[in-house]
Image (cartoon, helix red, strand yellow):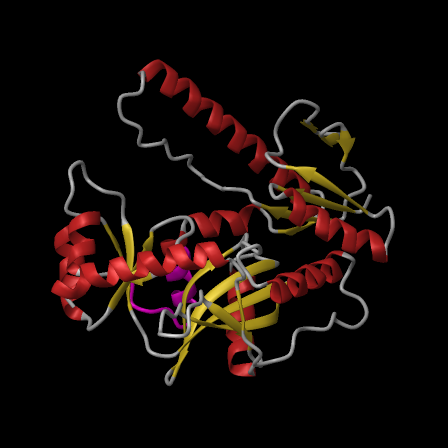
Amino acid sequence: MEIALFTADAPLGDALHTLLEAQAPGTSRRFSLPMAGPGDALGMDRMIQQGTSLAGVRRAWIQGHAHQNPVVPDPAEGVDWGLWQVDYLARQQRESARMSLLQEMERRGVRMFNGFAAYQAGFHLYASLERLRGAGLAIPPLLCANDPQEARAFLDAHSRVVWHPASGRGAWQLFRPKQLKALLETDPAPTPLLLAPAREGTLCHAYLVGGTLQLLLGQDAPSNQPGEERLEQFWRLPIPERLRLPLERAAALLHADWLLIRLVDGPGGPWIYDFDPDPVLNDLPPPFRDALLRLLAHALLGGEGPLPALPPQGEPHQRPALFVRRMLCLLFDLEASKGRDDG
């Protein structure tokens, strides 16, 4: 076994494993997360997961690892302190076991997709974006705060502002006075938000595999126009060198071999808004999800030979989820009606 797949999504992990086995039988094995449980051992002379030695592993893919360092306690109210403390300590130990395994695999020369440093950069999103800015990459002006006065001043200073959770995943959304009131003007003090000015341009998802920009997708917002009801749609874009060089440099600075970078490509060049070292593939239209799995299989097998074929450029695809589409359209209509009083 040369390739280890650690996945929380069994069908997705099985699909990648099938691709690998079709090209190189016997080279890969799928392990289920959380990477810490019965049958696992880590020592100076052994790495064992679910009863299997990892001694011969040369490359590994991690999917679905909800990284926290330090572990953040759940904001549960009315929970017995003794029970809460035991649960929190158990979560800390599970996270410590995962991080130890990731770091030990890297120390032994395993090429990780992705390793500890990339996950840590994703957890500390604001600090990582500022580090990229310091390295000369184009990052929008950012505010990370839970102070409503600071947020209001930032909102007043820019014509349109978007917000994102300060850590973890989340969609960028418009930040209006009602969001400020609901998210920050609360008691007890709220968790911090990440604020940035919105920029006109094409919203892009850039996927880097093996540290190389392999797939660039444009994204269009949902539509509920008469006769047209759809979720976000994506289409493949050509990759210009003016994007390739800074995005691959960002991946190198983040120590990420497998990375999603979200950016807006506008008249003045690209702005990098955030990144994800563990991209969610099942949210993509099937043609792009399958293309990324083929690219991952190619990289995990050593990256030799021609790259797999990609979907045609410019052809839009959307997520085929009719029920979700209807429910989201209702939610968008409700949100639009709530916003009419404050623009």
Quadrant in which the C terminus is drawn: bottom left
Quadrant in which the N terminus is drawn: top right
Nearest the viewer among 260 and 318 is 318
* Residue at 62%, 41% in the rendered image: 102
From this viewpoint, is residue 210 visible?
no
From this viewpoint, is residue 173 visible?
yes
Q: Residue furthest right?
A: 25
The location of residue 4, given as percent across then percent down, is 73, 44
* 139 on left or right of 317: left
Residue 342 lies in what quarter of the image? bottom left
Q: Does the segment drawn in magenta span residue 131?
A: yes
* 287 on left or right of 81: right
* Residue at 54%, 75% in the rendered image: 316
Nearest the viewer among 301 and 253 is 301
The region drawn magenta spans 128-143
Up-down relation of residue 297 to residue 141 (above or below): above
Q: Residue furthest front?
A: 227
The location of residue 310, given as percent across then percent down, is 68, 73
* Residue at 78%, 57% in the rendered image: 301
Up-down relation of residue 25 to residue 31 (above or below): below
Q: Residue furthest bottom?
A: 267
* 178 on left or right of 320: left
